[in-house]
Image (cartoon, helix red, strand yellow):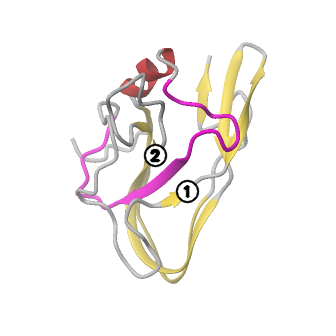
Amino acid sequence: MAFDGNNYMCTSFKKELLFGAHDFANGADTFKIALYTSSATLDASTTAYSATNEASGTGYTAAGNSLTNVDPTSSGTTALTDFADTTWSTATITARGALIYNSTPNTTSIALTNPSVVVLDFGADKTSTAGDFTIVFPTADASNAIIRIA
């Protein structure tokens, strides 16, 4: 399945949380975001970063940008974490979506390299031409944070 207009918390990520494979404390693990073209096949079943159908262009490096974590917190009965916005500067890129993945997981817990966390579908191609391509993450609260467990 290609992008379908939905965002997904990857199923494998949910299981890996129970194994302690991901540490979202600020700076503990390195989470990255890679951009993909409309030809990419990403959904809830995506298990790891792949370069297949990854976006390319001036100002974009394969495997994407490292993200700055927002330390996990809770609000009511919802646990959440988020990331600071990220930008590819002076970039010429077209992307339909993105994959957030962990480039430094606890590999004693899981066998995957670069396991997936979240698939983002932009709803349509987004383009920058010799300008900034910015991912703006939602407000880090119980209703909007990019990663919420209720």
Residue at the far front in the pictured view: 108
Residue numbers of the magenta segment: 21-43
Q: Is residue 25 magenta?
A: yes
Q: Quadrant of the N terminus?
A: top left
Residue furthest to the bottom in view is 130
Residue situated in front as seen by the camera: 102 or 95: 102
Q: Secondary structure at mark 1?
A: strand
* Residue 31 included in the magenta stretch of the image: yes
Q: Is residue 52 left or right of residue 135?
A: left
Q: Residue at x 78, y 15 (%)?
A: 76
Judging by the rendered image, the residue that carries numbered circle 1 is: 66
Residue at 47% of width from left, 79% of height from top?
Answer: 59
The mark nearer the N terminus, 2 or 1, is 1
* Left-right relation of 150 to 109: right
Q: Say the numbered circle drawn on residue 103.
A: 2
Which x, y percent locates residue 135?
57, 59
Q: Are marks 2 and 1 in contact (CB under 8 Å)?
A: yes
Q: Say which element carries label 2.
A: loop
